[in-house]
Amino acid sequence: MTNRTIRVSASILCADFARLGDEIKKCEDAGVDMLHVDVMDGHFVPNLSIGAVIVETIRPRTKLPIDVHLMVDNPSMLLDLFLDAGADIVSIHAECYGPLREGCRQAHQFPKEVDFIEADRLRADIVRIKSRGKKAFVAINPGTPLCLQSVLEDLDGILIMSVNPGFAKQKFMPLALPKLQELARIFEGDIAVDGGVNALTAPEAVKAGANVLVTASYFFGSENPRQLVKGLKSLAGS
Ligand code: DX5
Ligand code: ZN
């Protein structure tokens, strides 16, 4: 149960990249609150997507905050690049800051998962993002437990993955729900959920505690994106 305002972050992963300017306008007209940019390096996830050049391209075209989701092995190396390009929120993955579980250490083994993080190393990158006046989120894969107690106070938000990252159009994993519920009890920052968000799963995610809904295929596949955003936002207080 949340009484917080619900914000919608449209992931451009499902946008038509040949008409990116129009797609950004579509997000604005539909009333989304931010643009989610999924960055994949082919190492942290089994897919490649887009880089800082797209953030740079979008930045002068919109006032919407740009929310960069870094699905990369070495986020520390790329932080400044994305902050310079115009990111307002940067999500870095917990799995990049702790010993990977056996079974996902090799290059071709996915999803990447950890049982705990090295807090000092993660905190250093959180501080770097915040020292630029930007918001720092940590993302957690479905199989990684909530292992962020030691950095909770440093964070602006947490991004709970409800699919194994790498692709849009996957099915929402209900194992995200207890994490959202636990966070709603212990964390005052933004609680975002990413993956498989749609008309059926969004109410469950909001009821469990999410206040930021990330959507790619549901939003970009919609005939009436304005109505869709209105519907998602109306879940506040449910
Ligand atoms: C998955 C990405 C998600 C994805 C969501 O790796 O992080 O942001 O774009 O896509 P849908 O909303 O289609 O599940
Ligand atoms: Zn994402």
Image (spheres, rainbow, N blue to C red):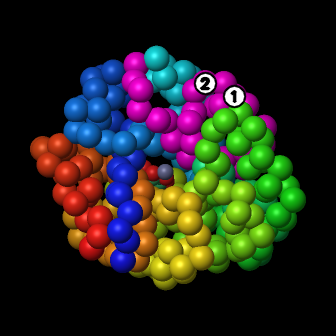
Q: Is residue 54 magenta?
A: no
Q: Position of residue 118 (x, y in %)?
A: 84, 65
Q: Position of residue 114 (x, y in %)?
A: 72, 71
Near mark 2 (Cα within 10 A), the count class, few <14, some 14-19 or many ≥20, is: some
Q: Position of residue 133 (x, y in %)?
A: 67, 36
Q: Is residue 64 magenta?
A: yes
Q: Quadrant of the N terminus?
A: bottom left
Between 141 and 58, the residue placed more toward the observer is 58
Q: Amino acid at mark 2?
A: Ala
Q: Are marks 2 and 1 in contact (CB under 8 Å)?
A: yes
In the picture provided, is 223 more to the left or to the right than 5? left
Q: Residue at x 56, y 60 (%)?
A: 189
Q: Which residues are magenta?
A: 61-89
Q: Residue at x 66, y 57 (%)?
A: 155
Q: How many marks?
A: 2
Residue 216 visible in the current orientation = yes
* Residue, far front: 3
Residue 23 visible in the current orientation = no
- Disc 1: which residue: 81
Q: Quadrant of the C terminus?
A: bottom left
Say which quarter of the image contains residue 2: bottom left
Q: CA distance from mark 2 to mark 1?
A: 6 Å
